[in-house]
């Protein structure tokens, strides 16, 4: 899978996390800090192999704006 970074948290002090990427399959990939065990219990019906990460709404909205500007018509 090839990933292209759409947006990252401008306040990130250590590289590119949290971030949102576009994959060559047309799906979004989110990189962030994993939820701890107590927060994971709040998820509804997680499937084996699924993970949950934290990411600010601002980074998601920034990624959506960039996606909207760059997607083919």
Image (tube, helix red, strand yellow):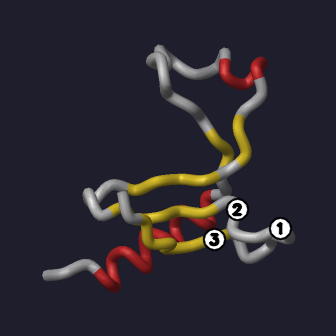
Could you tell me how far apart the alpha carbons at marks 2 and 1 are, in whole angstroms? 7 Å
Give the secondary structure at mark 2: loop
Mark 1 highlights which residue?
14
The residue drawn where x is 53% and y is 62% is: 20
Q: Residue 3 carries which label?
A: none
Which comes before the other along the chain, label 1 or label 3? 3
Query: How many residues crowd around disc 2 within 10 Å: few (fewer than 14), some, or many (20 or more)?
Result: some
Residue 1: image location, x then y, percent: 36, 57
Is 52 left, or right, of 11 in this rendering?
left
Could you tell me how far apart the alpha carbons at marks 3 and 2 are, in whole angstroms? 6 Å
The residue drawn where x is 67% and y is 51% is: 32
Quarter-of-image position of residue 14:
bottom right
Image quarter of the C terminus: bottom left
Mark 2 highlights which residue?
17
Give yes or no for contact between labels 1 and 3 (Cβ–Cβ under 8 Å).
Answer: no
Give the secondary structure at mark 3: strand
Give yes or no for contact between labels 2 and 1 (Cβ–Cβ under 8 Å).
Answer: yes
Q: Where 63 sits versus 29, above or below? A: below
Mark 3 highlights which residue?
8
Query: How many residues crowd around disc 1 within 10 Å: few (fewer than 14), some, or many (20 or more)?
Result: few
Residue 60: image location, x then y, percent: 54, 62
Is 20 left, or right, of 47 in this rendering?
right
Give the secondary structure at mark 1: loop
Query: How many residues crowd around disc 3 within 10 Å: few (fewer than 14), some, or many (20 or more)?
Result: many
Is 40 left, or right, of 25 in this rendering?
right
Which comes before the other along the chain, label 3 or label 2? 3
Give yes or no for contact between labels 3 and 2 (Cβ–Cβ under 8 Å).
Answer: yes
Residue 34: image location, x then y, percent: 70, 38
Residue lying farthest front? 1
């Amino acid at each position: 899978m090839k990933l292209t970074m759409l947006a990252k948290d401008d306040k990130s002090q250590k590289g590119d996390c949290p971030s949102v990427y576009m994959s060559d399959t047309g799906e979004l990939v989110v990189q962030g800090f994993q939820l701890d065990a107590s927060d994971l219990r709040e998820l509804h019906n997680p499937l084996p192999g699924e993970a949950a990460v934290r990411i600010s709404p601002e980074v998601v909205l920034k990624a959506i704006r960039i996606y909207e500007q760059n997607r083919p018509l």
